[in-house]
Each structure stands twice: as C-alpha cells, then as structure tokens.
Image (spheres, rainbow, N blue to C red):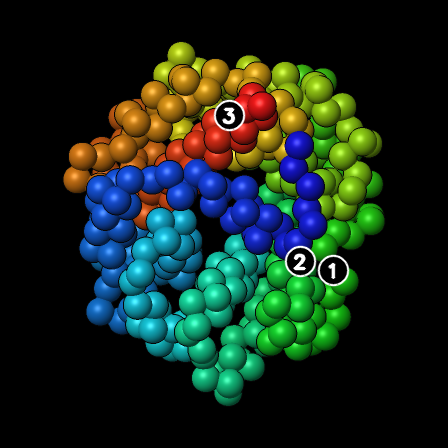
Amino acid sequence: MITFQSSFLDTLDQILKPGTALFSPEFRALHAQFITSRQTRDGGFRGRGKNADLYYTEFAVRALVLLDDECDLKAVGKYVEKLRLPPGVIHAFSLLNLLRMLHHRGVSIKPERMDGLLRCASEMMLDIDNSMNHIFVRAICRDLCAWPNLPWLSGLRRLARLPRGCNPIEGASIRFLQSGDGGFRQRPKLRVSEVNATAAAVSYLALAGQLGEIRDQAAVDFLLSMQTADGGLKNHRTAPAADLLSTFTGLITLAALGALERADLAGVARFVREMESPEGGFRGWIGDTEADVEYTCYGLATAALLRSHATSRLKEKTP
C-alpha cells in the first residue's frame, strides 16, 4: 500500500525510481532519442502536431526525468518564460510540474516572468469544472504549492489563498461517485464507471487520509475487471481497447490499495512491449499507428512500476 509522506508527485517518483534504475542503457537511449526528436526550435515539445505545446512539453520532460537522461533543459526554461498560458487547471498542473522538474534540474526562470506565470496559474486553479479528474488535479496543484522544497511556490499558495492538498467538502462528495460495480464516475449524473476517475478518486482520498471511507475491495474488483485479453486495462466497460494511460493509472491505483499482485502482471508486461515502437517511443493502444510523448511517458512509467514491484517482491522473499 502506498502512503504519501511527501508530495504526491515526489512520492510517485520514489515509487518508480527502483524500476527506472533497471532500464538498460540501450532502452534509455532509444526512448530518450525519440523524445528529444520531438523538441521544437522554441525549446518546447510537440505532440502529434507540428508546434510545441505546454501539455506535451510537461510529458516529454517527465519522461526524460524517468529515464534519468542528461539532456540540457535550459531551452525548456526559455520556452516556459515565453509562454502565454492556455486556460484551465490541467495547464496549471502542466506548468507547475514543469517548474518543479526544472527546479530539480537547476534550471531557473527569470523572477519577473515567474511572478506572471504564478499569477496566471493561481487564476487557472480556480477552474470550476467538478469532474473527478479536475478535482484531483486541483488537489495536486495545491499539494505542489505546500511543500518547502519548492519555496517559490509558497507565494502562489498565498496568492491563490489555497489550503494544502484536499478540501474536506470535496472529499465527502467523492464517496457518492462510487458506483455499484466499485468503480468511480467522473460526475454524479453519469452512469459509467471509469478507471481514470477511479484512479483520481482513490489518489485524492489517499492524500486526504480517507481511503477507509470507500468500498476499497469493490474498487479493486472493478479495476481488475478492466484488464483485457491483450493484457492492458481499458478505461470503461464499453471502451473498444486497452490503452497505456488507463493501464498505468489502474496499476498505480491497485498499488495504492495494496492489490497490485492480483492483476495479471505478465499480461501487462506483454501489452507494454506490444505498445513499444522499434524506432523509440510508445503507442497508446493496439491499432494506434504513431508513438507520441504522452503515451511514451505512460509506457515508461508502467514498465518502471512493474520492475519496482518485482524488485520489492524479490526483497521480501530474500531471507
């Protein structure tokens, strides 16, 4: 079972690190080369289009950090300094996590530009979309603003008048999103349970210390039922195929609930290998024809989680 003794993202890094340490040099080089091939002249990274995008830049840097790649991220810092931020809490998260990763790599942002970015982020974090995913992302943003290893974010916390982490009112309302099948819905009026909504709900409640207030074994059963014959997890019952996003979020949620070993992990490993492109990068689902940096990040994270879990099990069995 996962406990959050530091920020959510730092805890996630710590969970994956033992697995990424086992990546071979050839594996690292192949996928790092793919990611860096998506960097544009302005220093950002592109998705499947031609232009750099904040959303994909965050995924690209996250993937390079997972690979412990020695790339110079100063160009990304310049890209961030020139950003005109699109609206929404998802982009606020992309910005804040980019700033966190750049800070850890020793890349600084001009103070006058940082002030403007943080002011924009504070406004974006007031997004009133109350889907489960948005509730969780807002909590991660607040969580990021609270930890002392990122002192420049304390100004954002004061600016936005935000508490740390989880809102008690939100936490109470999340329980009512759990369906009869054990999964969570994105919104109260929706009937379909989703892996990604379940992952967001469980992670939020884990941060809030409220996991005991849901039917956790029912959530485990729902997640396990989403594993397909291909080995990956699909997002909901009527989804046409498994995908790497749902596979990673489903597995990390099973880990948070202490039930990762109940999944067919050999099947997951087979699915991840199937999604890996020989030229580098990962595709999103069977039938997807192109690798991109977002699914590459999820592919690397899933591979790391599997290795981390195998390593911890081996240590448990070693006298």
Q: Which mark is residue 143?
A: 2
Task: Using residue 272 as the reference point, say whether residue 127 is left or right of it.
Answer: right
Identify the element where label 3 is drawn. Answer: helix
Tell me, yes or no, whether the two marked residues, 2 and 1, touch with CB atoms within 8 Å. yes
Task: Name the amino acid, label 1.
Answer: Arg
Residue 253 visible to the viewer: yes
* Structural crowding at the residue carrying mark 2, measured as other residues with C-alpha within 10 Å and reported as few (<14), some (14–19) or many (≥20): many
Q: Which mark is residue 43?
A: none
Q: Quadrant of the C terminus?
A: top right
Q: Position of residue 24 (x, y in %)?
A: 29, 40
Q: Quadrant of the N terminus?
A: top right
Give above or below for 184 relative to 40.
above
Identify the element where label 1 is drawn. Answer: loop
Q: Which residue in the protein does label 1 denote?
A: 164
Chain-order first, disc 2 or disc 3: 2
- The residue sitting at 45% across, 79% down in the picture is 109
Q: Position of residue 89 (x, y in %)?
A: 57, 58
Q: Position of residue 152 (x, y in %)?
A: 60, 76
* Structural crowding at the residue carrying mark 3, measured as other residues with C-alpha within 10 Å and reported as few (<14), some (14–19) or many (≥20): few
Chain-order first, disc 3 or disc 1: 1
* Structural crowding at the residue carrying mark 1, measured as other residues with C-alpha within 10 Å and reported as few (<14), some (14–19) or many (≥20): some
Q: Using the image as rendered, state which of residue 308 and residue 151 is in the foreground.
A: 308
Task: Name the amino acid, label 3.
Answer: Leu
Q: Using the image as rendered, state which of residue 195 and residue 216 is in the foreground.
A: 216
Q: Which residue in the protein does label 3 denote?
A: 314
Residue occupying the far bottom of the picture: 112
Task: Name the amino acid, label 2.
Answer: Asp
